[in-house]
Amino acid sequence: MFRIIALSTAAVLVAAGSASAMNATVRYGDLDLTTPAGTARLDARIASTANAACAAYAGLQRRNCRSAIRKEAIDQLPTPRRTDYTLNRRSFDV
């Protein structure tokens, strides 16, 4: 089954100083999160989505926006998938 993480950046953008909101989707159903390669691909997809969603910001606001999106995306993973991800991921740069 193809699963979807829906990222709502409303809280992120409000925290970054904007009242605007947007939704983004990061697909991960095709990834094997029990491997470092799978978690790296998910990190890349989240980073790409965060870059697009936070493009209007600069400096610390951009970093905070991207960090919040990443946290929200990982928090939305079902617990078993989040555990696999956590055990097999490498560092993630915002």
Image (spheres, grey):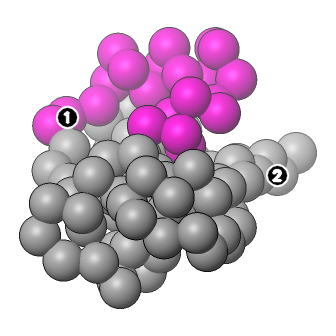
Q: Describe the element under mark 1 as helix, strand or loop.
A: loop
Specify start and end residues of the magenta stretch as a single range: 71-91
Image quadrant where residue 35 sits = top left
Residue type at mark 1: give it: Arg
Q: Describe the element under mark 2 as helix, strand or loop.
A: loop
Image quadrant where residue 41 sits = bottom left
Does residue 90 lie above or below 38 as drawn?
Answer: above
- Near-viewer residue (85 or 21): 21
Query: Is residue 77 within the magenta segment?
Result: yes
Q: Residue 73 got which mark?
A: none
C-alpha span from label 2 to label 1: 24 Å
* Residue 27 in view: no
Q: Residue 2 got which mark?
A: 2
Query: Is residue 20 within the magenta segment?
Result: no
Question: In the visual, does 60 lie left or right of 84?
Answer: left
Q: Residues within 10 Å of mark 1 (few under 14, many from 20)?
A: few
- Near-viewer residue (20 or 41): 20
Residue type at mark 2: give it: Phe
**Residue placed at 88% from the left, 45% from the top?**
1
**Residue placed at 62% from the left, 58% from the top?**
10
Question: In the visual, does 29 lie left or right of 87?
Answer: right
Q: Position of residue 46 (x, y in %)?
A: 44, 58
Disc 1 target residue: 90
Question: In the visual, does 81 lie left or right of 3?
Answer: left
**Residue placed at 57% from the left, 50% from the top?**
11
* Residue 39 in view: yes
Upstream in sequence: badge 2 or badge 1:
2
- Near-viewer residue (13 or 89): 13
Q: Position of residue 73 (x, y in %)?
A: 55, 43
Q: Position of residue 40 (x, y in %)?
A: 32, 48
